[in-house]
Image (cartoon, grey):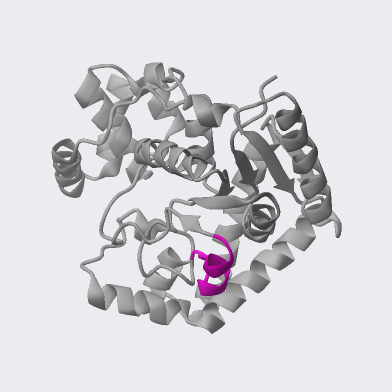
Amino acid sequence: MAVPPAILVLGPTASGKSALAVHLAERFDGEIVSVDSAQVYRGMDIGTAKPGAAERARVPHHLLDILDPTERYSAALFVRDAATMAADIRARGRIPIFAGGTMLYFKAITEGLSALPHAEPAIRDELAFRAARDGWPAMHAELALLDPVAAARIKPHDAQRVQRALEVHAVTGRPLSTLQGLRRTPCATLARALAVALLPSDRARLHAAIAQRFDTMLEAGLVDELRALRQRYDLAPALPSMRSVGYRQAWEFLDERIDLAALRMRGIAATRQLAKRQVTWLRAFSGAAFDSLDRNVTANVERFVGERLADARAARSIL
């Protein structure tokens, strides 16, 4: 088997994957590409746990701060950018290290994108107008006639998914449920990457780390960060950037819909749910898994990666 020309570092939130990626980049002469759907946005630093100046000074980081929070990003755009970054980094004789927690993006570069169409703003706007007039349950009832399989999986008040299912049908004339299993060819370079996943062996300790990190974000000024963003940009809570965990709850706080205690409680709960989804996805992932709570995890991953890279060089791979 050809040795992979890139390294993927995956893990749930608060598992230590960012620090591990920096260590691997320093050890194996690599550069880091962020796989995070929120870290692409400028000004969203605290709530996304974006690498700071110290980390960026140690190792080059890519796909950070490339968009304003009013803009939209997608898995398709990430695949395009990821392929470009991998080629550029390899052209410098270094190893691309993709690290983050947006599992959809990892799936897209390793397994290929879904065959679903891109977003159509005009159709989305029309659907949003009709939903404001008739309500999302009525839109869900319409979906049940067009695509009963998708409607059975989507709750009537899940506006984002109802809208997307109706949009797909409007664009393609085909039900979302018949297109979801179809995939385009993955990025050949990254589909062969060496993947390591950090999986915590103790859920309680992961939950404690999540709570501690969210408290740190609050103390560092998450609310003030969002307040400044709302003053600088024309933001709305429905934007993808503002649906990110932490920012969504901070938005409710700034609108005086919840108090600080509720912000903390809801933010931690939402982060736990995110981590649960990430862990579920990772348990079905085919890469090498390591216990993120093992005190020797960094050394263990370094040894594993080093052995695979040595095998690659011995096999005269394209590294």
- Residue depicted at 60% across the width and 29% down the height: 318
Q: Taking 223 as reference, is 243 above or below it?
A: above
* Left or right, 86 with reference to 290: left
- Residue depicted at 26% across the width and 30% down the height: 166
Answer with the quarter of the image where residue 17 lies: bottom right
Q: Position of residue 255 (x, y in %)?
A: 33, 76
Q: Taking 268 as reference, is 33 above or below it?
A: above
- Residue depicted at 20% across the width and 36% down the height: 120
- Residue depicted at 42% across the width and 27% down the height: 113
Q: Position of residue 173 (x, y in %)?
A: 22, 17
Q: Is 56 colored magenta in this rendering?
A: yes
* Left or right, 59 with reference to 2: left
Q: Which residues are magenta?
A: 48-59
Q: Position of residue 273 (x, y in %)?
A: 59, 53
Which residue is nearer to you in this view: 31 or 222? 31
Which residue is nearer to you in this view: 209 or 291? 291
Q: Is residue 202 visible?
A: no
